[in-house]
Structures are given as structure tokens and as C-alpha cells.
Amino acid sequence: MPNQELANDFTPTDHKTETFYEAHEMFKEMRAKCPVAHSEEFNGYWALFRYEDIVNVLKDPKTFVTSVQNVVPKVATTGRRPPLHLDPPEHTPYRRTLDPFLQDEKMEKLEPYVHDTIVELVEKFLAKGGGDISEELFHKLPGYVMAHFFNLSPDLSMRIREVTKRFAGSLYEVKNESVQEASLELYDIARTLIDMRKVNPMDPAEDVISAYINRKYKGEPLPDELILGTIRQLMVVGMIAPVVFSGSMMFHLTEHPEIQNQLRNDLSLVPAAIEEYLRLFTPYRGFARTAKQDVEIGGKTIKKDEPIAIVFASANHDESVFPDPDKFMLNRPNIKKHIAFGLGPHRCPGAPLARLMLTITLKELLARTNYIERTGEVKMAGWPEWGVLSLPVKISS
């Protein structure tokens, strides 16, 4: 029975007019005044803003599930996409098939290819002396990197990247029909990839698509429609967040040339900087869970089947966990507590690949420049992401 007496405690900021720090100013206010809040936007949902509340939800997947709604606003209407759209234990075979491809040994094998790809793209951008670094560099990086991960041609991988860009852009603009069109196009591509592997099989230990095709669970192959949904899901998840995160990180570096110089003068500091930037500029504010029964959080009753946004970006700025949360702090003592990649059974499996790509990108940019300066206004992403989509810069090499 839906709750008919819900207040409109907040309204998400409009990404078309949102300034870089505006969302975090709102998050700070909500943590202090209304950490468990309800919004009438996107057909109504709850949002959790405090670290402790969010961690408690993430650690209780039996009560708070992803199988009803995994993101606010709700967009998954074109099919089930494991592992994210299934709960344990149903999601487990899909997650266990993927995890081996993201272990340290695989990352070490992949690193030279990722490095060479990033260097080539960085040098092409730097040769121009500047431009929109988000659109002309960060937008391209995941597409080319994922080509290596999925054993695809760069052209095909970049086609996927372009469709995911259109998918995300339609989502930010709340253009539901366009979202569905892009989603169905991604399904068509996923179907093509699966057919390619069936015609020309690859070693399941070396190719993630082949691994799903050959996977058996309880003696039976995984259902075709769920393999399709899985490949469709994997094509998207690694293509969007790195773009907005990289733009946010670079925005901060243009605002703080002293940090640019510190890292440029000692590139060994870059991995630690990436961790602090992941905390500082977590790109997720709309991942969701749904309670299987009425629950009370922070004195508020959330009824069964009401969607709950878990605002990772706010949790990682919680003053009770991270002192001076808006300040960039290298080697923050409790940096391992950040939840940029989530927690629990749905913790992002792609974290190792993301860290590899981000670290190499920042190192190569800093090593090849003397100064990176912002030259215009930024464009921000809308729900469910938070971060920079467009960032014009001038480069001094």
C-alpha cells in the first residue's frame, strides 16, 4: 500500500543550470536537516544522504534488493540485466563468471594495451593544445579500453560508446522514449556480439562473452535471455561513470594548480590521488534499492516497494566519517572507507579496471604537460550520475 502522506523534502538540482558544487551543497544541507528524505520527482522516491544509513542498506541485501528498481529514475523496462538486476543467490553465477576477468593477473596482462591506447589518445588531444577534454578525450577512453577488455575491434567498441552516450544523455534529459530506443539498440549490439562468439568461439578463460555462453549453473547453461541482458549491462556500466568522474577530477585540478604541480612532480602520488578523487567526486547519486517490507530509517517509515536512492556522492562527504570532507587530502587516513564502488554483493566488479584506466590517464596527462587551464563553463550530468560532461581547457606542454 503506497504511502499517501509523503512530503516533498527536496528537489534534485537541474543539471542544465547546476554549478559544479551545487549538488554537494544540497547534500550537506540534507545530511544536517533531513538525511532520510522524500522527493516527488521521478514518480516519487526516498533518498539516503548519510554514510551510516547507506552502508547499513548496502550490507543488508536480503531486505534491500536491486531486483525491483536499481536506479532512480527507473529506466530498466526492456529486460533483466544480471548481475545488477538479480539478488543473491540468483545473481551469483553471473557475478562469478565476470570476477576472474577483473583480478590482478588479468589487469597485469591488460595493462600494456590499456597504457598504449591511453598514450595515443592523450597525445592526439595534447597536439591540439586544448579543447573540450571531456568530449574529445575522456569520452573516448572507455570505448577504446573496453575494446581490449571485450576483445572487440575499436570501431565496434566506439559504436557501443556512442550509443551509451546517447542513452545517458536521454536519461539526464528524462526523455524516456529515447532512453528505450538506445537501450534496445544496445540489446541488438549485445545479440550481435553473442552471435559472433557462437560462430567464432574464443577461449572462455580469455573472453568474457564466451565465458557466459559456456557457463553452466546447476548443470544447465545460463538462460539465453539473461546472457543477453548481462552483456547488455556490461557494455554500459564501464562506459559512463569514468567520463563524468574524469571530468570532475580535471575540473578540480584546473582549480588547484598547486595540486597539479605536486602530482606532476611526483607521479608516484597519483594512485593515492585517484582514491581521494574517487571519494571527493563519486559519480553516483541515483543507484537504488527497494525494501521488501516496511522499514524505519532515521525515524522515517519507508514502505514496502518504495524506491530508495542511495546517494553515494553524499555518503563520501559525510562529515562524521571524513573530516573536512570537501577538501582534497592525499593519503587520507581512512580513505579505504570510501564507497565510490559500493559495498556488498553488488560492489562494482569493474573497480580494478577503472583504477587502472584512471591512474594511467592522469599520469600520462601530467607527465606530458606543464599546465592545464580551464577556459570555459562546465556542463554537468543529471541523475543518476553526478559529474562533468564538458570541460574546455587550454594545455601548456
Image (cartoon, rainbow, N blue to C red):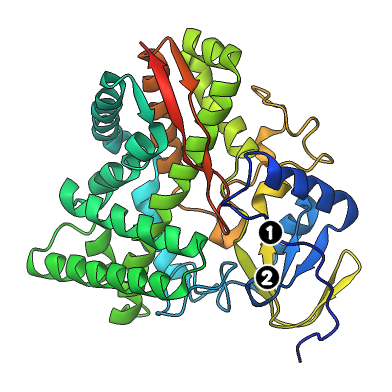
**Residue in the picture at 47% in, 12% down:** 264
- Check residue 41 in the rendering and tell me which mark sits there, or answer none: 2
Q: Quadrant of residue 35?
A: bottom right
Q: Amino acid at mark 2?
A: Glu
Q: Secondary structure at mark 2?
A: helix
Residue 281 % position (x, y): 60, 39
Counting other residues with Cα less than 10 Å from the Cα at mark 1, is it few (<14), some (14-19), or many (20 or more)? some
Q: Amino acid at mark 1?
A: Pro
Residue 93 % position (x, y): 41, 69
Q: Is residue 290 left or right of residue 353?
A: right
Q: Quadrant of residue 356?
A: top left
Answer yes or no: do the residues labelled 1 and 2 have beta carbons within 8 Å? yes
Residue 163 % position (x, y): 31, 59
Q: Secondary structure at mark 1?
A: loop
**Residue in the picture at 39% in, 33% down:** 132
**Residue in the picture at 48% in, 71% down:** 91
Is any atom of residue 126 visible in this view?
yes
Q: Is residue 315 left or right of residue 347?
A: right
